[in-house]
Amino acid sequence: MDFRQVQAGILAALADSPIASPSVAQDVKESVRVGELALAFDTLCSWLYEDSLPISRLLFERLVSLSVELEEPRAVEKLHELVTG
């Protein structure tokens, strides 16, 4: 994936996530906008885990793929606990 694909992937994951907090969504979007993709990704994953938000297997797999691209494996290491169905 190139930079733009990772940007789009993070924003798509955010849109498909159960995060309801406008401030968290804005933080992720702002980090993507300024090119801080690792920070945006970590913020997204951290909030999912901290709020124990259920995620689909498909979203989890997309997050794992993004973690490989960003070389951020720790961001997703506990998210498997949130997978439903």
Image (spheres, rainbow, N blue to C red):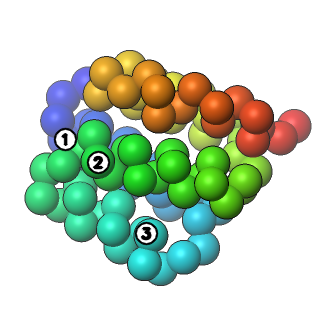
Secondary structure type for disc 1: helix
How packed is label 3: few (under 14 Cα within 10 Å), some, or many (20 or more)? Answer: some
The percent coordinates of residue 66 (x first, y second) are: 40, 30
N-terminal label among 2 and 1: 1
Q: What kind of residue is marked 3?
A: Ala
How packed is label 1: few (under 14 Cα within 10 Å), some, or many (20 or more)? Answer: few
Q: Quadrant of the N terminus?
A: top left
User: Is any part of residue 30 visible from this angle?
Assistant: yes
Is residue 69 shown left or right of residue 22?
left
The percent coordinates of residue 55 (x first, y second) are: 70, 46
**Is 77 drawn above or below residue 27 in the view shown?**
above
N-terminal label among 3 and 2: 3
Secondary structure type for disc 3: helix
Q: Are marks 1 and 3 in contact (CB under 8 Å)?
A: no
Compute the Cα span from label 1 to label 3: 19 Å
Residue at the spot of label 1: 4
Q: Quadrant of the C terminus?
A: top right
**Is 47 drawn above or below residue 66 in the view shown?**
below
The percent coordinates of residue 2 (x first, y second) are: 18, 28
User: Is any part of residue 16 visible from this angle?
Assistant: no
Is residue 42 shown left or right of residue 15?
left
| Camera-nearest label, 2 or 1 | 2
Q: Which mark is residue 52?
A: none
Q: Which mark is residue 25?
A: 3
Seen at 29% across and 28% down, the residue is 70
How packed is label 2: few (under 14 Cα within 10 Å), some, or many (20 or more)? Answer: some
Residue at the spot of label 2: 39
